[in-house]
Each structure stands twice: as structure tokens, then as C-alpha cells.
Image (cartoon, rainbow, N blue to C red):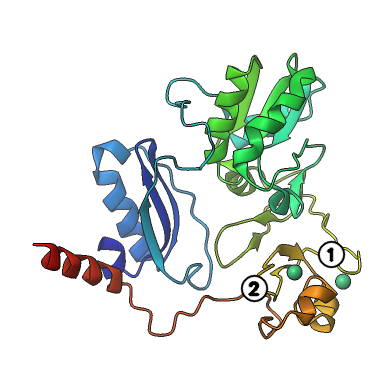
Amino acid sequence: MFSVENNIRGRIIISDEGLNGTVSGLKADCQKYMDFIHVDPRFSSTEFKIESFDKHAFTKIHVRYKPEIVHSALRHLDPNIKTGKHLNPAEFKKLKDQEDVVILDVRSNYEHELGHFKNALTLDIDNFRDFPEKVKGLGHLKGKKVLTYCTGGIKCEKASAFLLEQGFEDVYQLHGGIIKYGMEAGGEDFEGKCYVFDNRIAVEVNSVNPKVISTCHVCGTHSDRMINCANPTCNDHLAICEECGWRMEGACSEACQENPEKRPYNGTGYYQKNTNGYNPYNSIIRKSELAEISK
Ligand SMILES: [Zn+2]
Ligand SMILES: [Zn+2]
């Protein structure tokens, strides 16, 4: 209710492990939201990463309870007890070029294909659930310092805890993730853009030595223009250049272009779910009505 009344939109996950989410709103409203969270003694030390943007980054507000903040198949690990050593952006920047260091990207394909740290080891995974399986193939790195990183530092809590459990001894994690590294260390040596889970899709983090690393899925030229395939049953997140976007009508392949369900392409490659008549109070009202009925 707090979020609705203050026009805060976004995605918030509440679990027994803690709280995580991204929201957007006017500066004053976001400040109220942060104060609201900090008043609760359980969340008094919650850290916020603040970025400015000229419009809402979300269309709705979603608040959900989940057993784990990031679905990982690693529910037995409690990062509050044991996890990789936290490195702040300046420490990470200093350590990452040392010789005995491996930088490990714990994110999925569509994320690291758009951007990753120079020399990072990336994993061929479509979902964080597959991370434990891939770690089995990394045994040869056990004697090295392993530096994990992800978007906002949340996945790393579990990923680095899992590495420790698997016998990796010297494990570190980038505290606050790529986003904070961009804000506090200028994003140096992060190549490409950072994939984010809101309407912005991709954000710049490197103001020191930026580089485009992704290529258009259709023609292979350098492009970091992420779109969703216009075929709703495919809906793949891909880099497709401006020209190919128009030529393929937003589809990632000829098969997708010919799909009868294909959505009209407007040049953005972003497809809003149908939100006509959207009212954030609806689900709240519906639930209280249900409570009435069940009485
Ligand atoms: Zn192209
Ligand atoms: Zn497609």
C-alpha cells in the first residue's frame, strides 16, 4: 500500500533471507520509500544504489514473497553465515588484474553477452539455477583467488558461498555488483553494457574505457541494441542492430518473422504487456473481496 500511495513502481522480493528489489519514482517519493525501509530494525542497514532516470523504469509495482531471493537450487546455503569476502569497488579494481586471480561472471548468457569484465570467465548458462552444475567444471581453479561479480551483488552472496562449500578457498565477491562499480569506480574495464531487469534493459557503466562487445544477432556488426524478438513465443533477448531490426520487423530469424503471432515492431523491440486499464489497487481490492467471501 505504501508504494501505491507514493507512486513507487518496481519489483520487490521478500524472503526469509531478506529483502531485494528495484523501484522507480520521483526523488522525494523514493526518499520516503528508503526511510520507510530503514525504520524497520531488520532492514536498518539496507543499502540502496541510486541512479537518476527521466521516467519510471517500471510499469507496475510487484511485491512478492519467495522462499529465496534468487531462485538458485542452493537453498541450504546461508550467506549470513558463510560467503565470499566482500570487496568494495576500489578493492575489486585493484585486485582484478593480479596474476593469480580469476574473475568469474556468475550471470546468464543474455547478460554477459551484452557486457562483462575484460578477461572474465563467463558461464554458458541460461539461468542461475544451472550455476552449481557449471562449477563442477571449474575444479582446476581451486588454487586461485576467485572474484565473483553479478549485476547488483545479490547472486554473488550465494554463488561465492557455494564456491567455498565446493572447496574453493580464496573467494571474493564484488559488493554492490556492476552497478555500484560503475558509480564508484567509473566502471573501468567493464566491456559492453550492463543488462538490467527493468524497462531500461541496458545501462552504461564504464565511463573510463568503454567498448561495445556484443554483435548483431542477424548481421554480426557491433551492436549493443538489445531487443526482444517480436515473435512472442520466441521473445529472446538479443542484440539486433537498428537496420536489421527494421528489415526483420523486430524478429530474430526468418522463422520468427513469418510467425503469425508476430507483434508489430515500433523500432524499440520492447513489448509492454497489455496494461490498458491497469490499476495498482486492483489486486489489493480483489484480495480483500476474497477475504469477505471466505468469511
Ligand atoms: Zn544487424
Ligand atoms: Zn525469435
Q: How many marks?
A: 2
Q: Is residue 58 visible?
A: yes
Q: Is mark 2 within 8 Å of ligand 2?
A: no
Which circle marks residue 232 in the picture?
Answer: 2
**Amino acid type of the residue that numbered disc 2 sits on in the rendered structure:** Pro
Between 76 and 145, the one nearer to me in the picture: 76
Residue bearing mark 1: 217
Q: Is residue 92 visible?
A: no
Which circle marks residue 274 in the picture?
Answer: none
Q: Is residue 236 left or right of residue 286?
A: right
Residue depth check, mark 2 versus mark 1: number of the one nearer the observer: 2
Q: Quadrant of ligand 2?
A: bottom right
> Badge 2: how crowded within 10 Å, few (<14), some, or many (20+)?
some
Tell me if residue 80 comes above or below residue 221 in the rendering.
above
Across and down, in percent, residue 87 comes to: 59, 29
Question: Residue at horizontal 39%, vertical 41%?
Answer: 67
Question: Residue at horizontal 65%, vertical 17%?
Answer: 170
Across and down, in percent, residue 89 comes to: 62, 37
Question: Residue at horizontal 65%, vertical 56%?
Answer: 195
Say which quadrant the N terminus sits in: bottom left
Q: Are marks 2 and 1 in contact (CB under 8 Å)?
A: no
| Residue 91, quarter of the rendered image | top right
Q: Is mark 1 within 8 Å of ligand 1?
A: yes
Across and down, in percent, residue 88 comes to: 58, 33
User: How far apart are labels 2 and 1 at the CA level?
Assistant: 17 Å
Q: Secondary structure at mark 2?
A: loop
Across and down, in percent, residue 152 comes to: 55, 45
**Amino acid type of the residue that numbered disc 1 sits on in the rendered structure:** His
Tell me if residue 209 comes above or below residue 215 in the rendering.
above
